[in-house]
Image (spheres, rainbow, N blue to C red):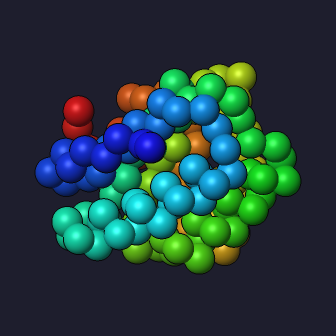
Amino acid sequence: MPIFQNKGDYLLVEVNEPYSVEMIASAIHEVTAYCKEHNLNKALVDMRNMPGAPSILERHRFGIELAKEWGSRIKAALILRPEDLSHMTENTAVNRGANLLSTSDAAHAMKWLGVTG
């Protein structure tokens, strides 16, 4: 289960458990619910400590789901290990109206979101 922390002006999500399609799909919906409940519109999702990684097809599917679920309502940055960084999820989501960044640089993610640590 990812760890959710309200940082005041954004939601921090730390994903430390092994990758599974079910866990990521559930986390996408949990982010929506948490942001709605706490009146947040920014999320920083740190996936650097998540063992495993989705396939290219799974990344595409997650991009579609992110766009449907978050749309432009939640501005989100995904932080990934450099070896896992692929812009498939980002491109798929952004092409469908989402406001998403994928990066391996936490400082860049926070700056793009307009938040401080």
Residue at 58% across, 65% down: 66
Q: Is residue 76 left or right of residue 68?
A: left
Residue shown at 30%/65% (left/top)?
A: 35
In the image, taking residue 52 as reference, residue 76 lies left or right, namely: left
Q: Is residue 115 above or below residue 99?
A: above
Q: Residue at x 71, y 22 (%)?
A: 83
Residue at point 66%, 74% (across, down):
96
Q: Can see residue 108?
A: no
Q: How many marks?
A: 0
As rendered, which of 102 and 57 lies closer to the eye? 57
**Quick check: 114 left or right of 58?**
left
Q: Position of residue 80 (x, y in %)?
A: 58, 32
Quadrant of the frame with the N terminus? top left
Most distant residue in the left direction: 8
Does residue 30 show up?
Answer: yes
Q: Quadrant of the C terminus?
A: top left
Pick the front one: 40 or 53: 53
Q: Quadrant of residue 90?
A: bottom right
Residue situated in front as seen by the camera: 108 or 4: 4
Expressed as whole percent of the image width and height from the top left, the position of residue 53 reads 71, 35
Q: Position of residue 34 (x, y in %)?
A: 30, 63
Q: Position of residue 82 (x, y in %)?
A: 65, 23
- Seen in the picture, residue 106 relative to 113 is either above or below; the reply is above
- Is 21 situated above or below 28? above
